[in-house]
Image: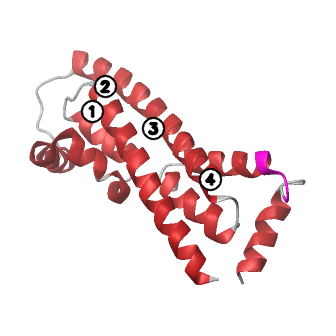
């Protein structure tokens, strides 16, 4: 079954098999997608596709980081426009819940919970709660790096024992 998945994936792009640059580019593109991010692209690249572990971890982390930084930039621009036009209305239940998480755990906690929530969503929660863009960016960067290393390291250890 694993071999069949590898064959299907490698047949999607001509020349992907044996071409490390194209393989890493495909991992980079996958890691840009919210909810797949680095924590989905790393296992796909290492376990299912059999790509080299260290380059996959670094590429997926960078791709996820680029995507989240673009998201943070867009959301912070939109938030500044919304705050300027905001009228006094009741916040939604979702906004109240997000604010409660933010007040309890702060930017570091919400960022590190990105593995559970999705890094994009974590960044959005922190920004919506009023955190500074630079502080959110710093903690999301740390979170992506930490979780990518943890997932990649565990997979590297585990893959040796699987086969």
Q: Is residue 14 left or right of residue 21?
A: right
Dot 2 lies on which element? helix
Contact check, label 2 and label 1, Cβ < 8 Å? yes
How far across and how far down the image is residue 26, in percent?
Answer: 71, 50
Residue closer to the observer: 14 or 124:
14
Residue drawn at x 48%, y 38% as measured from the top left: 65
How far across and how far down the image is residue 86, in percent?
Answer: 20, 22
**Callout 1 crowding tier (Cα within 10 Å): few <14, some 14–19, many ≥20:** many
Dot 4 lies on which element? helix
What's the distance in space between the residues labelled 1 and 4, CA to CA? 29 Å
Q: Which residue is mark 3?
A: 68
Which quarter of the picture shows residue 2? Answer: bottom right
Q: Which residue is mark 1?
A: 127
**Callout 3 crowding tier (Cα within 10 Å): few <14, some 14–19, many ≥20:** many
Q: Is residue 102 left or right of residue 27?
A: left
Residue closer to the observer: 30 or 149:
149
Contact check, label 3 and label 2, Cβ < 8 Å? no
Residue drawn at x 60%, y 53% as measured from the top left: 54
Q: Which numbered disc covers residue 133?
A: 2
Which quarter of the picture shows residue 14? Answer: bottom right
């Amino acid at each position: 079954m694993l071999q069949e998945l590898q064959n299907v994936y490698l047949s999607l792009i001509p020349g992907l098999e044996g071409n490390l640059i194209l393989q890493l580019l495909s991992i980079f593109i996958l890691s840009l997608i919210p909810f797949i991010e680095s924590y989905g692209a790393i296992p796909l690249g290492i376990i299912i596709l059999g790509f080299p572990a260290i380059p996959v971890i670094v590429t997926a982390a960078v791709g996820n980081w680029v995507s989240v930084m673009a998201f943070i930039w867009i959301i912070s621009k939109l938030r500044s426009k919304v705050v300027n036009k905001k009228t006094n209305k009741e916040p939604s239940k979702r906004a109240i819940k997000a604010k409660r998480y933010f007040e309890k755990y702060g930017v570091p906690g919400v960022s590190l919970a990105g593995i559970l929530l999705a890094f994009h969503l974590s960044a959005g929660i922190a920004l919506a709660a009023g955190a500074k863009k630079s502080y959110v960016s710093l903690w999301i960067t740390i979170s992506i790096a930490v979780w990518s290393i943890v997932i990649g390291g565990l997979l590297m250890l585990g893959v040796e024992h699987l086969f």
